[in-house]
Structure formats: structure tokens, C-alpha cells
Image: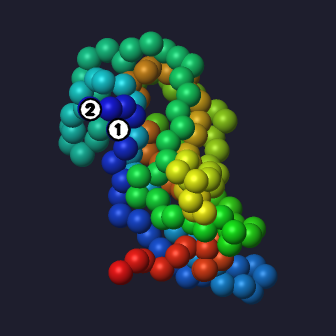
Amino acid sequence: MAYPEIVPNPRIDLLVTGATGHPLRSTTYSGVIRTGPTPITQVMGMTALKGAGGAMGPHALAVLLPDGLPYLQARLGAGFTVPEVAVQGMQEHVFIENLLTRFVPDPRGTPEAWVELSFAYAGPLTTVFSYRVTALVPPDAVPPPSQ
């Protein structure tokens, strides 16, 4: 299995009205990111790690959200993202810094962009994080599904 392992939750899409009165598409992505190869177990509904956590870092992580929508770069306008990351079930201290989400161009050269989540952390190599990223963009920044 490749690491980091990302397990997304169902995506939430809403049409909202911005502070300026213009419509926006609000998409919330959330899930769990597991770094490192140590097995994970569920104990009474909480995530627990088995075995040693590995090197204490610093470690850097940058991932494209696996359930991310394609955004049309030309229509993003003043679109923006808001990231949140939390550590789950760790006994050691874990410090998160440089938390950033952004729209990155499609590496295949298409006119689309994808949401990238990146951050650095000091702590065990094997750490479990929960994430939530909200993207607010003009409604036409997401192309309609192809048929």
C-alpha cells in the first residue's frame, strides 16, 4: 500500500450567497490521512496505532484530494480554499505548520485545476490526521458532469 493513505468522507456541495451577494459553490472535502506503514486499529471508535511510530520528523506532505472536483482555471476568479487539519489518537506531541491548500494546474496540461493540501509536521512518521478543506468558487468554475 502506498503512503500517505487517504480515506475521503462523502463530499458536501452547496450553492451559497457570498458577502457581496454573488452566488458561490461551496464544496467541503474531509477525510483521514495516514502517513507511514504502521498498521492502524480501531479501539472503541477511536483510531489507534500499533507499534513504533518511526522517525520524529520533520516531515512534509502534499497531496491532491482524491475526491476533488476538476475546477476550470479560467473561471476560478477570486475562488479560495480554507484548510483544517487535526491529529488523531496520538500519545506523542505532533506539531503542524505551513498548512496550505491551493488550486494547482492539472499536471497533464488540461485547463483544469485540482485542490492540493500540503503541510509539514514534526512528530512520528506514522501519524493519522483528519482533514477538512472548503473550496468557495463561482458556480461555473466546476464543469457539468460528462455524460
Q: Position of residue 56 (x, y in %)?
A: 49, 15
Alpha carbons under labels 1 and 2: distance apart: 8 Å
Task: Identify the image quadrant of residue 88.
Answer: top left
* For residue 2, side relative to residue 80 (left or right): left
What residue appears at the point 40 percent right and 40 percent down from the top-left corner? 33
Quarter containing the N terminus? top left
Q: Position of residue 100 (x, y in %)?
A: 64, 44
What residue appears at the point 57 percent right and 19 percent down from the top-left corner? 58
Query: What residue does disc 2 label?
Result: 1
Query: What residue does disc 1 label?
Result: 5
Is residue 115 visible from the viewing direction of this image?
Answer: no
Say how many tags the image has: 2
Disc 2 is placed on an element classified as loop
- Label 1, residues with CA under 10 Å away: few <14, some 14-19, many ≥20: some
Disc 1 is placed on an element classified as strand
Quarter containing the C terminus? bottom left
What residue appears at the point 54 percent right and 38 percent down from the top-left corner? 62
Q: Position of residue 35 (x, y in %)?
A: 39, 30
Amino acid type at image mark 2: Met
* For residue 131, side relative to residue 97 (left or right): left
Q: Is residue 10 above or below residue 47?
A: below
Amino acid type at image mark 1: Glu
Is residue 38 visible from the viewing direction of this image?
Answer: yes
Task: Identify the image quadrant of residue 77.
Answer: bottom right
Q: Are marks 1 and 2 in contact (CB under 8 Å)?
A: yes
Q: Which mark is residue 94?
A: none
Report the mark closest to the observer, 1 or 2: 2
